[in-house]
Image (spheres, rainbow, N blue to C red):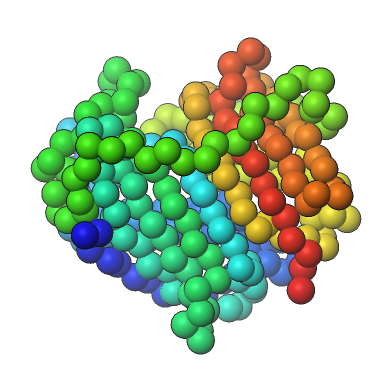
Amino acid sequence: MPGKKYTEEHKVVYFETNVTGRLNIGNLVDLCMLVSTDQSSNLGISTEKLDSMGYGWIVSQNIIDVKRIPVDHEKIKITTQAESYNRYFCYRDFMMEDEQGEEIVKMHTVFCLMDKEKRKIARIKDEIVGPYEGDYTTKVERLAVPPVLKPEEAEITKKYRVRFMDIDSNQHVNNIHYFDWMLDTLPEEFLRTHEVKQFNIVYKNEVRSGEVVDSLTHFDEERLESIHEIRVGDKVSCTAKVEWQELK
């Protein structure tokens, strides 16, 4: 059975929102990651302890399903639960509820353990995942992945230089910036009148300070769908498929 649950409350503040007054999708993910980090600390597996062991958690995929995005000043509850793990992947769920207890956002996340010195994925260690009490499985989840974006299909492209402030303690770009780079390619009027319905994002390769990324997008407004890719030269760093819904 799935592991221990952990819940925190949060009040959405204005600097976490965009011009529609709704929580930015990157900030939404960051809030979930914070709850996961706090649970780890409470269980004795803090970021500092992992760092002393030479490891750090990285995310390889997020699948975010949205009923509606929280708004400015709204009080929400964020619950996380370690679902299961195998030799190289850990699976964790996040649930976001409003004040009436209704689930408004759900996120499924795949974590990997990174060897910071070798910059490679490490085998999951029992002493690290044991306190979460998630199930061990030999199976690897076969999750849907974003389609390959062919160069001729990317009608929108923007460049961004990675700044010092974009790099986190794992020495690569914090995941929130991928969301910003991707969504910044879309028309402002569309973003003012629509919100995410599902965001499926896969992280493939690290982006480092000083590099220049290309954000490529195929946007199908009629189907309310966008396909995204972040590249550094010929190297694909991140891909995503986004389904949209009209603001209510």
Q: Nearer the viewer, residue 27 or 162?
A: 27
Q: Residue at x 57, y 31 (%)?
A: 238
Q: Quadrant of the N terminus?
A: bottom left
The quarter of the picture where the C terminus appears is bottom right
Q: Is 73 left, or right, of 2 in this rendering? A: right
Question: Which x, y percent locates residue 197?
Answer: 65, 58
Q: Return the x and y of residue 203 as percentages of the image width and height.
A: 50, 33
Height in image: 165 above or below 10? above
* Vertical relation: 72 (above or below) 137: below
Residue 161 in sight from this viewpoint: no
Q: Residue at x 28, y 66 (%)?
A: 5
Q: Residue at 59% of width from left, 16% of height from top?
A: 235
Query: In the image as oriented, which residue stretches furthest toward the top?
Result: 234
Task: Give residue 204's position: percent from left, percent from top.
Answer: 50, 27
Residue lying at the far left of the rendered structure: 127
Task: Examine the rendered structure and indicate whether residue 59 appears above or below residue 162.
Answer: below
Side of 241 relative to 114 (left or right): right
Residue 122 seen by the camera: yes
Count of residue discs? 0
Kindly indicate the quadrant of the structure image that contains residue 192: bottom right
